[in-house]
């Protein structure tokens, strides 16, 4: 195992490891990490048979792991015979403090630090739409019937519009996200869109007004529900129910997972469960091996 700075990483081998492994999600791709992280290094096992992205910052001259904005899961990606606990121990020898999001495949038995379970809801799209819809809740079926009665329609919209709408609606809720985070996310999403890796859709009411917008990222494994935005009128019209169902219908029958992107919020959790999704849990890893006096201040 070695930990090296991002500028020394072989981008082609890194991205191949992300693309070729089930637990390699889009947040770990080289360009996405570079866009969203202040700094990052990579833990690499052998010749990129397994990798682990390590976003970091410095405070008081001390390097620490942190979770960049719009990054849900990172963790160890790939297959290796090295115990995961040994991987984590390798990290904490070099980095003494951190808050870090693992992925659903990581099982840190008897490792340093504390691990908080997090929710993430996913839906298998490989079946046909009728089979997928058959797992919708009765409540959702009723909502969709009502939504169709509102004469809603869906069309393409710009990445910029989707990001701006999300920021306007939710920047107070996600106060830790800064202006630069939204700007960086907009830039990388526009770049991904050029390669078929991002798209945005809007729901329009019968008066021609936008009532909901969704921004989605796409790789060879998943569709990521990154920025779902529902305007006040759209809540009454059940516009987000209508939009997500339309995306699920469009991509049904493909070997993809629809990743709802969370959430631990009770209301959002119940909403995503309406679609017959399952909770693919992952863990938030916190560790603190700072010197005693600093540790007493920084829990």
Image: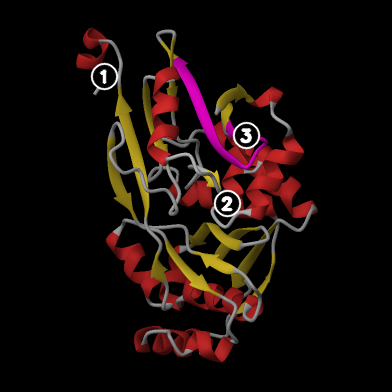
Q: Position of residue 177 (x, y in %)?
A: 47, 37
Q: Earlier in the sequence, mark 2 or mark 3?
A: 2
Q: Quadrant of residue 14?
A: top right
Magenta stretch encompasses residue 46: yes
Marks 1 and 2 in Cβ contact (< 8 Å)? no
Quick check: 263 above or below 84?
below
Q: Quadrant of the N terminus?
A: top right
Label 3 crowd (10 A; few <14 / some 14-19 / many >=20) = few
202 relative position to 140: left or right: right
| Residue nearer the viewer, 225 or 76 | 76
| Mark 2 or 3: the one toward you | 3
**Residue 211 is at least partly visible in this image:** no
Q: Residue at x 40, y 62 (%)?
A: 280
What secondary structure predominates along the stretch shown in magenta?
A: strand
Q: Which residue is mark 2?
A: 25
Q: Residue at x 52, y 78 (%)?
A: 242
Q: Position of residue 131 (x, y in %)?
A: 52, 89
Q: Earlier in the sequence, mark 3 or mark 1?
A: 3
**Residue 271 is at least partly visible in this image:** yes
Q: Report how far apart the C-alphas of labels 1 and 2 lie in the structure.
A: 31 Å
What span is colored magenta in the figure?
A: 44-58
| Residue nearer the viewer, 237 or 219 | 219
Quick check: 108 above or below 253?
above
Quick check: 173 above or below 246?
above
22 relative position to 273: left or right: right
- Under circle 1, the secondary element is loop
Q: Which residue is mark 3?
A: 46
Q: Residue at x 38, y 37 (%)?
A: 85
| Mark 3 or 1: the one toward you | 3
């Amino acid at each position: 195992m070695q930990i090296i700075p991002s500028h020394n990483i072989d981008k082609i081998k890194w991205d191949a490891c992300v693309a070729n492994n089930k637990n390699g999600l889009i947040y770990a791709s080289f360009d996405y990490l570079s866009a969203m992280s202040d700094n990052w290094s990579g833990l690499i096992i052998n010749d990129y048979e397994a990798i682990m992205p390590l976003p970091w910052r410095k405070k008081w001259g001390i390097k620490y792991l942190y979770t960049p904005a719009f990054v849900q899961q990172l963790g160890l990606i790939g297959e290796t015979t090295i115990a995961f606990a040994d991987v984590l121990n390798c990290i904490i020898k070099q980095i003494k403090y951190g808050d870090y999001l693992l992925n659903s495949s990581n099982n840190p038995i008897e490792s340093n630090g504390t691990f908080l379970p997090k929710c993430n809801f996913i839906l298998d799209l490989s079946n046909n739409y009728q089979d997928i819809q058959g797992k919708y809740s009765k409540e959702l079926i009723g909502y969709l019937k009502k939504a169709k009665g509102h004469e809603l329609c869906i069309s393409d919209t710009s990445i910029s519009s989707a990001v701006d709408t999300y920021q306007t609606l939710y920047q107070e809720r996600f106060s830790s996200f800064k202006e630069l985070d939204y700007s960086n996310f907009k830039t990388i999403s526009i770049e991904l869109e050029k390669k078929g890796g991002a798209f945005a859709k809007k729901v329009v009411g019968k008066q021609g007004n936008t009532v909901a917008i969704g921004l989605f990222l796409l790789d060879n494994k998943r569709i990521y529900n990154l920025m779902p935005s529902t305007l006040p009128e759209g809540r009454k019209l059940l516009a987000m129910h209508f939009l997500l169902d339309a995306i699920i219908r469009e991509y049904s029958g493909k070997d993809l997972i629809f990743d709802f992107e969370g959430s631990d919020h009770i209301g959002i959790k119940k909403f995503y469960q309406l679609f017959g999704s399952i909770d693919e849990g992952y863990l938030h890893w916190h560790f603190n091996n700072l010197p005693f006096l600093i540790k007493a201040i920084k829990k």
